[in-house]
Image: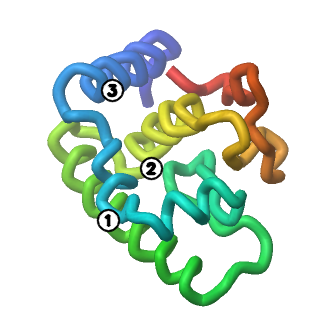
Amino acid sequence: MRSLIEKPVAATALALAMLVGLGMVAPAGAQSRGEAYSAAKAQGQVGEQRNGYLGVVGNQSADVRSMVRDINNKRRAIYTSKAASLSSTIDEYAFTTACRLITETSPGEKYEGLDGSWKTRGAGAPERDPKCP
């Protein structure tokens, strides 16, 4: 069992490792950031979830659902590799990445709020999970 000090230190170390050396996980989403992804994002059909994966907002076409599934499969592969290299769990790595991806959303884009509902990013910062590093 980790002490109360070790948990924040571990989370901070994980966040710093992400910022310093892994080229960030932007390529996870960028791998499928073609025109379809950009359009779906701009139209609010997809959004960043608090678990590090892309989500489908509402009822969307099979093409949008397939694109999201493909992006998430690629993200999971990256999360698995990066988490192992950092002696972290996939879920911890994905969560830390989600904190960054939600922060990087642009005004008008969707993200999962703290209450689990879809929010539209305004001009200000999105809601931030208090557990984010």
Quadrant of res 97: top left
Between disc 3 and disc 1, the foreground one is 1
Asked whether, in this view, residue 87 is left or right of residue 75, the answer is left
Sequence order check: which comes first, mark 2 or mark 3? 3
Q: Are marks 2 and 3 in contact (CB under 8 Å)?
A: no
Helix, strand or loop at label 1? It is helix
Which residue is the extreme one toward the top? Answer: 5
Residue holding disc 1: 74
Quick check: 49 above or below 122? below
Out of 15 and 118, give the one closest to the viewer: 118
Name the residue located 66 percent from the left edge and 85 percent from the top edge: 61
Q: Amino acid at mark 1?
A: Lys
Sequence order check: which comes first, mark 2 or mark 1? 1
CA gap, disc 2 to disc 3? Answer: 12 Å
Which residue is the extreme one toward the bottom? Answer: 62
Quick check: 125 above or below 22? above
Helix, strand or loop at label 2? It is helix
Q: Position of residue 13 (x, y in %)?
A: 31, 19
Asked whether, in this view, residue 32 is left or right of residue 53, the answer is left
CA gap, disc 3 to disc 1? Answer: 21 Å
Asked whether, in this view, residue 67 is left or right of residue 28, the answer is right
**Mark seen at residue 91:** 2
Between disc 2 and disc 1, the foreground one is 1
Q: Position of residue 121 (x, y in %)?
A: 74, 36
Q: Position of residue 46 (x, y in %)?
A: 63, 62
Asked whether, in this view, residue 3 is left or right of residue 127, the answer is left
- Mark 3, Cα crowd under 10 Å, few <14 / some 14-19 / many 20+, is many
Sequence order check: which comes first, mark 3 or mark 1? 3
Q: Position of residue 6 (x, y in %)?
A: 40, 16
Name the residue located 69 percent from the left edge and 65 percent from the top edge: 45
Residue holding disc 3: 14
